[in-house]
Amino acid sequence: MDPQDFVELSCANCLEGAGLDFDFSFAFQPIVDTVQQNIFSYEALVRGSGNEPASHVLNQLTDHTRYRFDQACRVKIIRMAVELGIPVNVNINFYPNAVYKAELCIRTTLAAADTFGFPINRIIFEVTEGEEIEDHAHLRSIIQAYRRLGFRTAIDDFGAGYSGLNLLSEFQPDFIKLDMKLVQGINHNKPRQAIVKGIIQVCKELGIEIIAEGVETREEFSWLSDAGISLLQGYHFARPGFEILPAVPAETYL
């Protein structure tokens, strides 16, 4: 890939979609803290400008536009977080294979946080385990650079992708997000229960918090809560809201 593809972009460039021939927006889904019974964070989920699914946008990416898209996502999410009045954390997905040099690529994010007035300590960057990591040392350097600047990090879709526990042996994020395939039906699936219990023990020893995503039923919620996982995300609490912050009914915590 040509390093010229990674030229530094301004907030205005990103908001205008410089170098991209398609538009996009975001839906927001809450991550709840079931102990505190409040919203811990909102994950920003990419959508088409008319609320088309993520695939509608992602299928238009090329190797030459991935970096610009990654940068534009960060700026748009931060602006929308301020416009929507998000008072808690925001989870932003990023593409490690699109980050050329962490210190350079993060400048646009820092500028956006300063321009729109969003605290960087409320930004959690998620890297999906579902994307094959081409260079683990490069990803480790990204995580370390983000932490030095005050951001927090998470591994998304943990247990579903290419690297699994190998990622945790090389670096420790602040959070892991259990993949929904491990979570759904866990209340009556003993192999999944055993796997998740093992992950809980590993994360406890490494000082990593767990978020369970894809929680759709009260029974899944109850089993995960009893196992000690209090940060949950899924349709049981709220579906993603396109360009809005969906409410979480009080009864879903019970």
Image: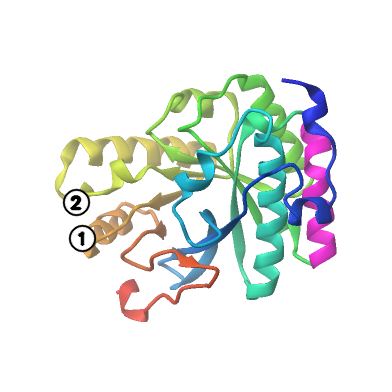
| Residue 140 falls in image quadrant | top right
Residue 84 in view in this figure: yes
Question: Residue 1's spot in the image, x, y percent?
Answer: 71, 20
- Residue 95 lies, with reference to residue 10, above or below; the image says above
Question: Residue 76's spot in the image, x, y percent?
Answer: 69, 58
Q: Is residue 166 left or right of residue 105?
A: left
Q: Secondary structure at mark 1?
A: helix
**Residue at 83% over, 44% down:** 9
Q: Nearer the viewer, residue 31 or 239?
A: 239
Q: Main secondary structure of the magenta part?
A: helix
Residue, disc 2:
187
Q: Nearer the viewer, residue 237 or 198?
A: 237
Q: Residues within 10 Å of mark 1 (few under 14, many from 20)?
A: some
Residue 122 in view in this figure: no
Tell me how far mark 1 sits from mark 2, CA to CA: 6 Å
Q: Which residues are magenta?
A: 101-116
Q: Nearer the viewer, residue 131 or 91?
A: 131
Q: Are marks 1 and 2 in contact (CB under 8 Å)?
A: yes
Q: Is residue 92 left or right of residue 158?
A: right
Question: Residue 203's spot in the image, x, y percent?
Answer: 46, 39
**Residue at 30% over, 54% down:** 224
| Residue 94 falls in image quadrant | top right
Residue, disc 1:
219
Question: Residue 21's spot in the image, x, y percent?
Answer: 66, 45
Q: How many marks?
A: 2
Please state which amino acid type lies under the numbered disc 2.
Asn
Q: Which badge, 1 or 2, comes first in the chain's sequence?
A: 2
